């Protein structure tokens, strides 16, 4: 059964899918065309209140109460056709934020396509002195 709380969501406008990741450590994909739910991964321990974006075939996660990394999972590439679309690779660690005690929660996340840059806004490090 589908249950989710304290989730982050990201939209893939190309494939018309919504990706959700919540406190239950499960990544879900929901087709906006068929309303079909698909569980993609069930052991993603980032804690509550991470931030996410979907950019050019990749699902990005920054923070969460137990995550100091910028994680990325390639869901598909431009070269994939409809018959060979992936359900995704494993998550890779792109960067670790050393100044976060355990993680960062409730931050804003923007992607600037012209600069190929992410901008992280605010949030809080709950375990910081």
Image (tube, rainbow, N blue to C red):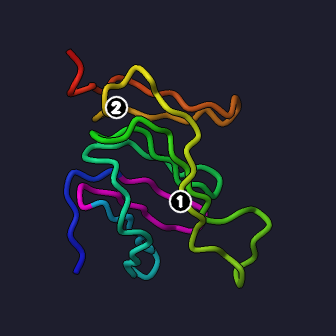
Q: Position of residue 62 (x, y in %)?
A: 43, 39
Q: What residue range appears in magenta? A: 9-24
The residue located at (48%, 67%) in the rendering is 17
128 w.r.t. 37: above or below: above
- Quadrant of image for the C terminus: top left
Callout in the foreground (1, 2): 2
Lateral position of residue 63 relative to residue 16, left or right: left
Residue for badge 1: 12
How many tags in the picture?
A: 2
Helix, strand or loop at label 1? It is strand
x then y, percent, for residue 101: 31, 26
Vertical comparison of 29 with 93: above or below = below
The answer for how far apart the CA atoms under marks 1 and 2 are is 20 Å
Q: Are marks 1 and 2 in contact (CB under 8 Å)?
A: no
Which residue is disc 2 drawn over? 107
**Residue at horizontal 40%, vertical 35%?**
68
């Amino acid at each position: 059964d589908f249950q989710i709380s304290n989730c982050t969501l990201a939209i893939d406008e190309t494939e018309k899918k919504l990706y959700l990741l919540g406190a239950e450590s499960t990544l879900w994909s929901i087709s906006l065309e068929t309303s079909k739910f698909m569980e993609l991964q069930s052991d993603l321990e980032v804690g509550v209140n991470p931030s996410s974006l979907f950019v050019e075939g990749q699902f990005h996660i920054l923070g969460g109460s137990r995550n100091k990394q910028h994680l990325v999972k390639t869901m598909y590439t431009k070269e994939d056709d409809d018959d060979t679309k992936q359900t995704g690779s494993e998550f890779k660690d792109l960067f670790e934020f050393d100044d976060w005690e355990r993680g960062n929660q409730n931050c804003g996340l923007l992607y600037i396509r012209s600069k190929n840059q992410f901008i992280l806004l605010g949030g809080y490090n709950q375990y910081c002195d």
